[in-house]
Image (spheres, rainbow, N blue to C red):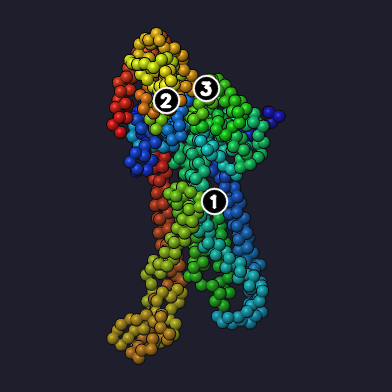
Amino acid sequence: MSAVTVLSVGAPDRRPAHPTRALARAVLRPHQSALWFWGLLVALIGGGLLWAAGPGFDAAWDAYLKSGCREADYCDMGPAYQRYDMVVTLGPAVLTVAPALIGAWAGASLIGRELESGTAKLAWTQSVAPARWLAAKLAVPAALIVSGTVLLTLLNRLVWWREEPLRRAVVTRDWFAVTTFTGNGTLATAYALLALTVGVVAGLLLRRSLPALAAGFAGTLALMGVLQANRDHLWPVVDTRSSSSEPLWKGMLVDQGIVTASGDRISNVLCGEPDCGRSDVVGYWAQSHPSSHFWPLQLVETGIVVAVTALLVLASFHLLRRRTGGAA
Amino acid sequence: MTDTAIETAALGKRFGWRQGGWALRDCTLRLPVGRVCAVVGPNGAGKSTLLAHAAGLLAPTEGGISVLGTTPSAARERMAYVAQDKPLYPQLTVAETLRMGAELNPRRWDAAVAGRIVEEGGLDLGSKIRSLSGGQRTRVALALALGKRPELLLLDEPMADLDPLARHQLMGTLLADSADHGTTVVMSSHVVAELEGSCDHLFLLGGGRVRLAGPLDALIAAHTLVTGPTGDLAPHTVVESRTTGRQITALIRPEGRIAAGWRTAEPTLEELVLAHLRAPGAPALTLTDEGDAHDEGDGGTNSGNNDGETNGTRTRGASV
């Protein structure tokens, strides 16, 4: 009995393959349920998107052809299209919501609870220096998060590429809608990593799981909100003028208005009518981002997010060093 | 190779910025390797703070500490620490916890030792930590610590959660294991009885300061319990005295010959500790290691040498 017991404890690790891999496993083991959750989520959404890119889209396209819908008018294309629409809406939506959840998890479970319950001390008094512990705490979840978000982003883009004829025929989705914009580019991954570091810093600062959960969640939402609200300004807008009040822009409208006889440009976004009830209108203007601005906007915002993430990583190591008194 | 397990120099730690918030102050100690040292003191004496510094979990506010001849963080791999609340991951099983020990100590892990300690407690390897009792958790924490094969084992209130039988058995395992491997053990406690007979070195802390430090034999030899009619105990240093009727009972540090009228006895560890705890104003005493192994005269010289420091402590105490 005794030999069996000892063997079952020791045998798998008699010769640990690699100290770094062993550390990664040790970091991951307490978070098995979170790992399962993330894996299942990615698998479910990924499977749905794969279906949407193949049979789902075919069925939706058939439904469109049969419905006789023309142009951009609202038009009921039946249950096949609705199923498809639900899945392709969910794909980017999950990537947009995931960062807030990651921030909450990282603050509460990954760091906060360890400091609150003292298991961090347990880890720091093994043969692993606190700085390596934190590096593993950042790197292992980061690798798993990036794998998931990159996979889902690629699948989102596959669907986006596949459904182009449908989009052209019936305007179903705009490239600049918040979830579509995030889920179709590098931002989903960047925001997920930002959330991880926000949570880690919140956990190290607050040292308790519940406050760190709230701070990780709210901090991520606040940072995402601020950046998304200012997305328009991250790349020069395209200015268009016209003498008619007809729509003269394409893509994401930033602002539009009227040109008065004296040459003033006044925004009419808040007016009830295009001419704002004025009689001295000599023309109309609009500022917008055409779809060709997708990647410039995407990359500038990603760059900002990555920079903030890097600062938070530095801050987390600094906080840890202060806590463990240079022993890191 | 160094023969010093822990050495502190004027170590001080203040939590927060409050004036007088010192958890540890002016702590100068030396512990040779191979000892089993008890760190004793009332709650809030600074025992946990001292151990956490040795484990490299806290940075000193002032002064310094070296462990196994180097900094605590450089000695991390060679020492083990069990915190007072025995933190473990509640969602892991016993087997997973031990596997984590193997993964985090790849160069030192001894699965047989860890497995044996867990097995002696009749623990099921598949049960989750959260389902274990406090005592069983202590056992797993100790298995994790001993599985690391440490040169220095730091235990903060290790036996507090154990029933007397398990305490006796686990202490036996611990001491046998450390004797076999020459492990230095430092354990804190406020239950003096649990340390009697298992320790050969003593640090007594009180109010964040060192009150007594040195080999247990030498410390006991430096004190005498005297009983007699009320009278002057000069020139001896009186740690604590109690008068009942015309009788006086006192714990003293003899300075020269004790007058004939007194009945003398050697104090027990408990009497020594309790007398110092009841008399917080008593001067501190630090004995170095050489005294106990050789002749008594050497020990006497040592305690004499410490008079200067003793007086200094008393002066500081008076000025506060």
Q: Residue at x 42, y 86 (%)?
A: A273
Please, what is the three-letter code of the amino acid marked with disc 2? Answer: His
Nearest the camera: A301 or A161? A301
Residue B143 position within the rendered picture, expressed as x and y whole percent measured from the top left: 58, 31
Foreground disc of the pair 1, 2:
2
Q: Is residue A1 left or right of residue A238?
A: right
Chain of the residue under label 2: B
Residue B261's place in the image compared with A159, above or below, is: above
| Residue A170 appears anywhere in the view | yes
Please, what is the three-letter code of the amino acid marked with disc 1? Answer: Leu
Nearest the camera: B152 or B290? B290
Which element carries disc 2, helix, strand or loop? helix
Chain of the residue under label 1: A
Q: Quadrant of the C terminus of chain B?
A: top left
Which element carries disc 1, helix, strand or loop? helix
Please, what is the three-letter code of the amino acid marked with disc 3? Answer: Glu
Q: Is residue A166 left or right of residue B202?
A: right
Decide which of tag 2 and tag 3 comes sooner along the chain: 3
Would you name the residue on which mark 2 appears?
A: B276
